[in-house]
Image (cartoon, helix red, strand yellow):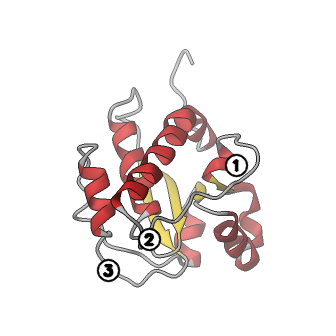
Amino acid sequence: MKTILFVCTGNTCRSSMAEAMLKELIKESEYKDEEIRVISAGTWAIEGQKANEKAIQAMKEKNIDLTGHRSTPLTKEIAEKADLILTMTQNHKNQILKALPEMEEKVYTLKEFAGDKGELDIMDPYGQSIKVYKQTAEEMEKLLKKTLEKILQFINIKKEGK
């Protein structure tokens, strides 16, 4: 089983939306039968919190149900089990690498992994309008679609003939 881990701060907005969207993209792809686990956690998450209501609403508009999500604090054990760790900001990446420098080869910001230049942070929509949550979801979805193949190749999931 290969594991992709998304990391943000509270694990109630960005990382939970990215997790849900990537699961959906994989389900709709030719990789749907592969053993791929997509999870998320937060650097300052409180165990068991529900996804933010606006995150739930933004995902609902994409026909993705986020109501069952519960937040998970990032631990060394979770990070070690991941084959690829995609963070929402450079600060999240730095926090992980400060605590676990041996993870350097598998920790990237989502934008960095996608090859974006310049600003590597995905804005935190927490406390903002539903419009901002939708914009954040759109930005992440574009990045995930753009990098799905690269993500799967990174964790050594390859289809024959590709």
Q: CA distance from mark 1 to mark 2?
A: 22 Å
Identify the residue at the far bottom of this view: 46
Residue type, mark 2 in image? Tyr
- Residue assigned mark 3: 48
Q: CA distance from mark 1 to mark 3?
A: 29 Å
Report the mark closest to the observer, 1 or 2.
Answer: 2
Q: Answer yes or no: is residue 1 visible.
A: no
Identify the residue at the far top of this view: 161
Residue 95: % across, % down: 69, 75
Placement of the C terminus among the 4 image quadrants: top right
- Residue assigned mark 1: 112
Total numbered labels placed on residues in the image: 3
Image vertical order of residue 73 relative to residue 130, above or below: below
- Residue assigned mark 2: 126
Q: Earlier in the sequence, mark 1 or mark 3?
A: 3
Judged from the image, the secondary structure of the residue bearing numbered disc 2 is: loop
Judged from the image, the secondary structure of the residue bearing numbered disc 3 is: loop
Q: Residue at (59%, 44%) from the top-left corner?
A: 155
Q: Residue at (58%, 57%) from the top-left corner?
A: 122
Q: Residues within 10 Å of mark 2 (few under 14, many from 20)?
A: some
Front in this rendered view, residue 55 or 97: 55
Whether residues under marks 3 and 2 lie with C-beta atoms below 8 angstroms apart, the answer is no
Residue type, mark 1 in image? Glu
- Residue 130 sits in quarter: bottom left
Q: Which mark is residue 151?
A: none
Q: Is residue 94 left or right of residue 2?
A: right
